[in-house]
Amino acid sequence: MAVTIKDVARESGVNISTVSRALNHGYGVNEQTRERVVAVAARLDYRPNRVARGLVTGRTHSLALVLSDIRNPFFAELARGAEDAARAGNCDLVLCNSDLDPDKQMQYVRSLLEKRVDGILMNSVAVLSREQQARLAACGVPIVLLNRSALNRAFSTVCADNETGGALAAKYLLGLGHRKIAHLTGPREHGNLSDRTRGFISTLQSAKDPVQPIVLRGKFNFSGGCELTKQLLDEHPDVTAIFAGNDVMAFGAVRAALDRGLRIPEDLSLIGFDNIEFASVIHPPLTTIHQPMYEMGHAAIEILLRLARDKNKQVPEHRTLGVELIERQSCRQLSCINSIAVNSCNRPASC
């Protein structure tokens, strides 16, 4: 038989409410009594029933993280930040992979709500219909969107400054003298990728010598980057630089270039976005836009914890974290003509 709070109370010589307050650092319990109750609970190996406690307090101290695919290294780092923040807040974190399938995603959400989680952190809510978004907004549980704009005012958001990141990539390639530039990205409805594209294109088009980039859209994974690069090289063999929508797509671009006998950066310059760990390991190391993945996951859980603690003050919060260019060895200078200083990396362009 499992040890109950009644057993701890009987062994400690106090009532049940005193045991509860002693174990939860509540009011009205002197230190000597608290120490005796804690010692008895440890000796009896008492484990509080969180489900039962949740029925009383309205909290289960469990949070959920719904990602598109944990196999993407970007999400692994983000999930670690979320888990560390949840643990610091005395909460468990449940992980779900939606595979960008809206039906699977909603099935997970229904199951999580039935388990009475205190909050849900979601990455792939953008693929949901307006009806599904409205249903989520009315579910009574705080929801934070990752790397998404505020599609619904009921949701809090945490994202990187994706548009600025795209602009940094454009300025860097322009500063290196590139004019035949391509951008590989995902579907138009993918919010954060679209923001990167907007910042990249607008910066190229507003340059002193405007550039109209080649934009190809497809799957935003390794195979997508590889397929789009092959298409690009077939249709535009004179391209000199590629900005990939994320690092995983950039890795696919490396594969396609190698298959064509092209060298990076001698024949083709390449810049990614995310700065996942593998970006510094591949050859050559990838120049990329860094976004603080761990900090994003951590910040999103902090918001959920705040909303879960005070359900009467469900005021949405929006945080945008800064990005920076990480210069490595996958891009090269074409010429000194019209080169400009690249403020993002504090390094003047040079031959």
Image (tube, helix red, strand yellow):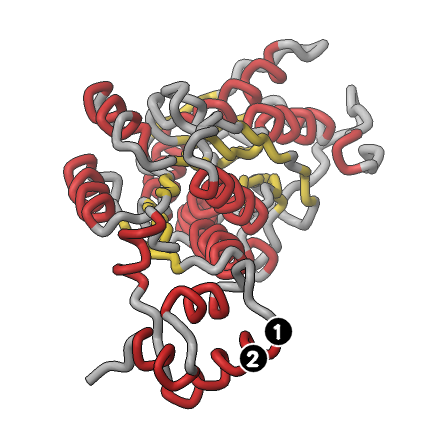
How crowded pointer 2 is (Cα within 10 Å; few <14, some 14-19, many 20+) is rated as some
Q: Position of residue 59 (x, y in %)?
A: 35, 49
Kindly tell me whether residue 71 is visible in this rendering. no
Residue displayed at 38% across by 23% down: 154
Q: Which residue is mark 1?
A: 31
Relative depth, front residue between 254 and 113: 113
Q: Relative to 236, does residue 71 appear above or below in the rendering?
A: below
Tag 2–tag 1 contact (CB < 8 Å): yes
Residue at 44%, 56% in the rendered image: 76
Between 90 and 269, the one nearer to me in the picture? 90
Q: Quadrant of residue 225?
A: top left
289 lies left or right of 238 = right
Relative horizontal placement of residue 60, taking residue 313 as reference (left or right): left
Q: Residue under label 2, please give it.
A: 35
Count of numbered labels shown in the rendering: 2
Residue 106 visible? The answer is yes
Please state the horizontal and vertical placement of residue 263, each as a whole percent of the image. 55, 49
The amino acid type of the residue labelled 2 equals Glu
Secondary structure state at the residue bearing disc 1:
helix
